[in-house]
Amino acid sequence: MDLDDLATDPFDVAAQAARVIADATGVARHDVALVLGSGWGGAADLIGETVAEIPSHDVPGFTRPAVVGHVGTIRSIRLTGAPGAQPRHALVLGSRTHLYEGLGVRRVVHGVRTAAAAGARQLVLTNGCGGLDPAWAPGTPVLISDHINLTATSPLEGATFIDLTDLYSARLRGLAHEVDPTLPEGVYVQFRGPHYETPAEVAMAGRMGGHLVGMSTTLEAIAARQAGLEVLGISLVTNAAAGVSDQPLSHAEVLEAGAAAGPRISALLAQIIARL
């Protein structure tokens, strides 16, 4: 089945992908899913035992990652739990498709829909982003409390009306605060990319109520709500957004900040996952 064919039901493709993952991993149901953005990849090694790892492009609807810093695999991980407890599994999606790649919105949210088809009820979305608050130095993790979608598109098709009032779960943010009460919260603003935002655009985002700017996450979160998933979003501030500091922006800077913060934020995320 081809996601790009308008006659194709994207949920059918997600169901087929979920069956392929179940067969390849030997895990019939995954309880939680994670999308690991820039800087967050190390968390997969800390949340439990890897049962299986498969190339994402071997699964229907997935493509190879186009961004340096994203891995091209899907991992099934048996979560660390109390002795004797029923085993729980996480589906870790290392291959994220961005809207700016030009593959269409269906491709962007296919991983989320596949996770729901695989049985997940909770989704953790992570990203690397620019920060508007000068107090948030590179390496600061921030819980997403809400978002502003400036992509001029939606993953919902037709007359599909979904309430986004409490899209980013207050319950899950509460669990994250139990792990680290100092975690700040902010509103994430998604631009289309792939160019970085101008200082004027960043200033606009701030006036609109934004605290973080980036090129992912919001479309995935909307699709997750449609699929009935409970969403936790966490951003890693990898740089000051354009105009907040006098330094130019670069993807190398994003990777460097992510690598430096990786061990700390991975441990943080692993502790949060253990509470889900």
Image (cartoon, rainbow, N blue to C red):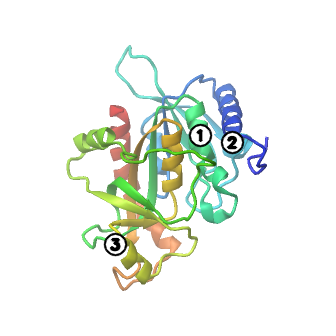
For marks 3 and 1, give the CA distance. Answer: 31 Å
Q: Which residue is mark 2?
A: 10
The picture places residue 195, in percent across and down from the top left corner, at: 56, 75
Q: Secondary structure at mark 3?
A: helix
The picture places residue 151, in percent across and down from the top left corner, at: 54, 65
Query: Reading the chain from its start, which is encountered first: label 3 or label 1?
Result: 1
For marks 1 and 2, give the CA distance. Answer: 8 Å
Q: Secondary structure at mark 2?
A: helix
The picture places residue 199, in percent across and down from the top left corner, at: 41, 82
Query: Reading the chain from its start, which is encountered first: label 2 or label 3?
Result: 2
Q: Residue at x 49, y 66 (%)?
A: 150
Placement of 46 over or under 140, stated as above or below: above
For marks 2 and 3, give the CA distance. Answer: 35 Å
| Near-viewer residue (212 or 59) | 212
| Near-viewer residue (139 or 171) | 171
| Residue 241 in sight in this render | no
Query: Which amino acid, mark 2?
Result: Pro
Please say if the residues under marks 2 and 3 sit with CB atoms less than 8 Å apart. no
Direction from residue 91 to residue 166 in the image, left or right: left
Q: Which residue is mark 3?
A: 206
Placement of 16 over or under 7, stated as above or below: above
Q: Label 2: few (<14), some or many (≥20) within 10 Å?
A: many
The picture places residue 32, in percent across and down from the top left corner, at: 47, 33
Q: Which residue is mark 1?
A: 113
Please say if the residues under marks 1 and 2 sit with CB atoms less than 8 Å apart. yes
Query: Which amino acid, mark 1?
Result: Arg
Q: Residue at x 59, y 24 (%)?
A: 27
Q: Secondary structure at mark 1?
A: helix
Query: Which amino acid, mark 3?
Result: Gly
Q: Label 3: few (<14), some or many (≥20) within 10 Å?
A: some
